[in-house]
Amino acid sequence: MKKTELEKLAAVKVMTRLRTSAVPERYAQGSASVPDRREQRRLDRERGLVPFAVKLDSGLARRLRALAGERSIGLNELVDELLRKGLGETG
């Protein structure tokens, strides 16, 4: 084998090792507190939440996101509040 081929193989080994290794905690500060998707779905189920997808006009979606940002609340909380208000319920 030529020296360049050996270097390429060594680089592949290093890249594979980097891809399979975990991210050091110092680079991912706070990421451990975010649950993965499966855990988040479990937490949502415990709170009685169900996924409910709808299609909205892009202008309306933009307004909802802006309003959620102004109020510093999540989009889910804002839509819940607006739907309850629209349906005459209190939450």
Image: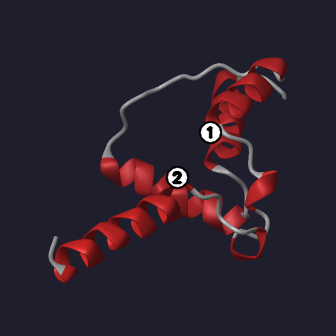
Pick whichever, 27 or 59, lies toward us: 27
Check residue 2 in the rendering and tell me which mark sits there, or answer none.
Answer: none
Pick whichever, 25 or 62, lies toward us: 25
Local secondary structure at mark 1: helix
State the quadrant of the C terminus.
top right
Where does the image place residue 35, in percent across and percent down from the top left?
74, 43
**Residue 79 placement, left or right of 59:** right
**Residue 20 placement, left or right of 45:** left
What residue type is disc 1 on?
Val
Most distant residue in the left direction: 2
Residue at image location 75% in from the left, 19% down from the top: 45
- Is 51 rendered above or below residue 37? above
Category of crowding for the residue at label 1, using alpha-carbon neighbours closer than 10 angstroms: few (below 14), some (14–19), many (at least 20): some
Local secondary structure at mark 2: helix
State the quadrant of the N terminus.
bottom left
Q: Earlier in the sequence, mark 1 or mark 2?
A: 2
Residue occupied by mark 1: 79
Residue at image location 71% in from the left, 69% down from the top: 24
Marks 1 & 2, CB-CB < 8 Å contact:
yes
Residue at image location 26% in from the left, 73% down from the top: 6
**Residue 45 placement, left or right of 58:** right
Q: How is the image coloured?
A: secondary structure
Where does the image place residue 69, in percent across and percent down from the top left?
63, 65
Count of labels shown?
2
What residue type is disc 2 on?
Leu
Quadrant of the rendered structure where residue 39 is?
top right
Residue occupied by mark 2: 64
Where does the image place residue 55, in percent across and percent down from the top left?
36, 32
Give the distance between the C-alpha atoms of the residues marked 1 and 2, in whole angstroms.
8 Å
Pick whichever, 57 or 29, lies toward us: 29
Quadrant of the rendered structure where residue 48 is?
top right
